[in-house]
Image (cartoon, grey):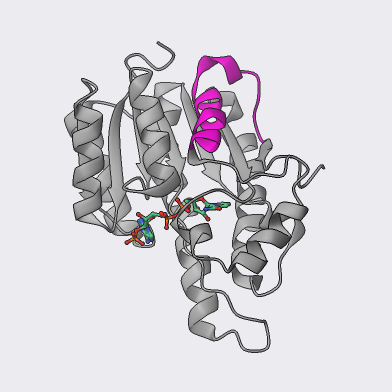
Amino acid sequence: MRLEGKVALVTGGARGIGREIALAFAREGADLVIWDVNPQESEKTCKDIESLGRKTLSDQIDVTDYAKVEEGINKILDKLGKIDILVNNAGITKDNLLLRMSQQEWDAVINVNLKGTFNCTKAVFRPLSKLRYGKIINIASIIGIIGNYGQANYAASKAGIIALTKTAAKELASRNVNVNAIAPGFIQTEMTAKLPEEVKKKMLEAIPMAKLGTPQDVANACLFLASNESDYITGQTIVVDGGMVMV
Ligand code: NDP
C-alpha cells in the first residue's frame, strides 16, 4: 500500500472531492483526520473510512480561524503522534460580476480558500519540519489560471493558492517536505450538477476530452502527490481537466 502508516489531514473532507481524497488515502493504508464545518457529513465519511480498517479523527474546524486550526493540529499530534500529509481542500464560491460583488462576497471566499490554506500550512510548518518529511497538497482550480466571469474572488483565491504553493515549496524543500497544487477543471459534484443545461453544454464544448471529470480523477492525482512516487516534485500545479487548459 502506498500510504501505509501515514497520517493525513483533509480539510473540507466531509463531502465532495475532499471525501473522495480521504477514501482514496484510506484504501492505500493511511489514517485520516477530517476537518469540516459539517459534522453530520464528517461522521458519515469517518464511518466509511473506519470500515476500511483505518483510524479516524474528526473535528468541526473552520479553517478561517487560526486559533482553532492550531488547537486542532496539537490535538492530532497528541492523539495520532504525527501528521505526514495535509490536503488543503476546503473551498467555497460566492459568484457575482465584479461590478456587483460585495465586500462580504469577496472576503468570504478569500478567507476560506486562501487564508484557510495559509492557516493550515502555517500550523503544520513546525511539525512537518521536525519530522523531516511531509506532503502538502493544495486544491486550486483552473479558474486560478484562466479567470472566469463572475468569479473574481474565487479566481484570485485560487491564483493566490498557486503562488502560496510555490513559496511554501521553497521554504520547506530543505526539510524534505513537498508542497504541490492540483488545479481541477469541471468536476461532477453537487456544485456542477446545479448548473443550467446550457452552461454545461458550453463547458463540454471547451473540454477536448468532451466529458466532466470525477472526484476520483482528482483523488488519483492527489494520491500520487501524497505518495513517495512524487518525492522529487515540488512547487508544481497538476491540472486535472480533460485538456481544457494546456499551460
Ligand atoms: P463541496 O462544497 O462539495 O465540499 C467542500 C467541503 O468544505 C464541504 O464539506 C464544506 O462544508 C467544507 N467547508 C466549507 N467551508 C469550510 C471552512 N471554512 N472550513 C472547513 N470546511 C469548510 O466542494 P467540492 O468538493 O466541489 O470542492 C472541493 C475543492 O475543490 C474546493 O477547494 C473547490 O474550490 C475545488 N474545486 C472544485 C471543482 C468542482 O468542479 N467541483 C473544480 C475546481 C476546484 P459545507 O458542506 O458545510 O459547505
Which quarter shows the N terminus? top left
**How many numbered discs sit on the rendered protein?**
0
Return the x and y of residue 170 as percentages of the image width and height.
Answer: 65, 36
Furthest residue toward bottom = 100
**Residue 37 placement, left or right of 95:** left
Front residue of 186 and 120:
186
Instruction: Name the residue: 60% across, 40% down.
Output: 181
Residue 225 forms part of the magenta stretch:
yes
171 vs 55: above or below? below
Looking at the rendering, the stretch of residues picked out in magenta corresponds to: 216-235
Kindly tell me whether residue 196 is visible in this rendering. Answer: yes
On the image, the x and y values in percent for residue 7 come to 32, 26
> Main structural element of the magenta stretch: helix, strand or loop?
helix
Which residue corresponds to the image point at 61% horizontal and 56% vertical from the top-left?
A: 158
Residue 233 is drawn in which quadrant? top right
The answer to whether residue 84 is visible is: no
| Quarter holding ligand 1 | bottom left
Is 202 displayed left or right of 85 in the figure? right
Asked if 11 appears above or below 126 in the picture, the reply is: below
Where's the C terminus, which quadrant?
top right
- The foreground one among 79 and 26 is 26
Q: Is residue 13 magenta?
A: no
Outermost residue on the top side: it is 1
Q: Is residue 147 above or below residue 70?
A: below
Q: Where is residue 202, by image quadrant? A: bottom right
Q: Relative to residue 215, is residue 143 depicted above or below?
A: below
Residue in view at x 68 percent, y 88 percent: 99
Q: Residue at x 39, y 26 (%)?
A: 25
User: Where residue 47 appears, x then y in whole percent?
Assistant: 18, 36
Q: Position of residue 215 (x, y in %)?
A: 49, 41
Determine which quarter of the picture holds residue 148. Answer: bottom right
